[in-house]
Image (tube, rainbow, N blue to C red):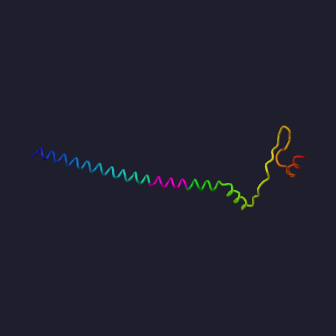
C-alpha cells in the first residue's frame, strides 16, 4: 500500500508540474505573439514615416511650397575665380555691373 501511494504521489506531482510548465509556456507564447503584432505595427508605422519623409523631401513639393510663399527661382549660379578675378557661368547684367564697380 505505501508503494502505491508513493507512485500515485509521484504521478500527481508530475501531472501538476507538467500543467504548471504548460501554463508558463502558453503565457510566454501569448507574450511572444503580442510582441510580434506590436513589431508588425511599428514596422508599418516606420514605413509610413519613411514614405512621408520621401514626399516631404521631394523637390516638386519644396518648389510648390516656396512658390506659395512668394519665392521665385533664382538664376544660374556664377562663380568667381579669386586668382584671376574672372566670373564664370551665365552672364547677368546686374552682377557684371557690380563686378565692374
- Which segment is the magenta one? 37-47
Judging depth in this view, the residue of 80 and 88 nearest the camera is 88
Which residue is situated farthest in the right direction here? 101
Q: Percent from the top left, x then y, of residue 83?
A: 84, 37
Residue sitting at x 75%, y 58%: 71
- Asked whether, in this view, residue 43 is left or right of residue 56, the answer is left
Q: Locate residue 7: give its quadrant.
A: top left
Examine the structure image and report whether residue 42 is included in the region drawn in magenta.
yes
Image position of 48 (left or right of 88): left
Asked if residue 36 lies left or right of residue 48, the reply is left
Q: x, y (%) of residue 81?
A: 82, 40
Q: Which of the pair 62/2 is nearer the observer?
A: 62
Q: Residue at x 26, y 48 (%)?
A: 18
- Residue at image location 57% in from the left, 55% down from the top: 49
**Residue most extreme to the left:** 1
Residue 46 counted in the magenta span = yes
Magenta segment's dominant SS is helix
User: Residue 32, percent across and down?
Assistant: 40, 51
Image position of 51 (left or right of 37):
right
Q: Position of residue 30 (x, y in %)?
A: 37, 53
Residue 7 to residue 58: above or below: above
Q: How many marks?
A: 0
Residue 82 higher or lower than 22, as above or below: above
Q: Residue furthest bottom?
A: 68
| Residue displayed at 44% across by 55% down | 37
| Residue furthest top as drawn | 83
Amino acid at each position: 500500500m505505501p508503494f502505491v501511494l508513493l507512485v500515485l504521489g509521484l504521478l500527481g506531482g508530475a501531472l501538476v508540474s507538467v500543467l504548471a510548465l504548460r501554463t508558463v509556456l502558453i503565457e510566454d507564447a501569448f507574450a511572444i505573439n503580442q510582441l510580434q503584432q506590436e513589431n508588425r505595427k511599428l514596422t508599418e508605422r516606420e514605413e509610413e514615416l519613411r514614405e512621408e519623409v520621401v514626399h516631404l523631401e521631394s523637390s516638386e513639393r519644396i518648389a510648390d511650397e516656396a512658390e506659395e510663399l512668394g519665392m521665385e527661382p533664382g538664376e544660374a549660379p556664377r562663380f568667381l575665380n579669386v586668382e584671376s578675378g574672372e566670373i564664370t557661368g551665365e552672364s547677368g547684367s546686374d552682377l557684371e555691373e557690380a563686378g565692374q564697380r
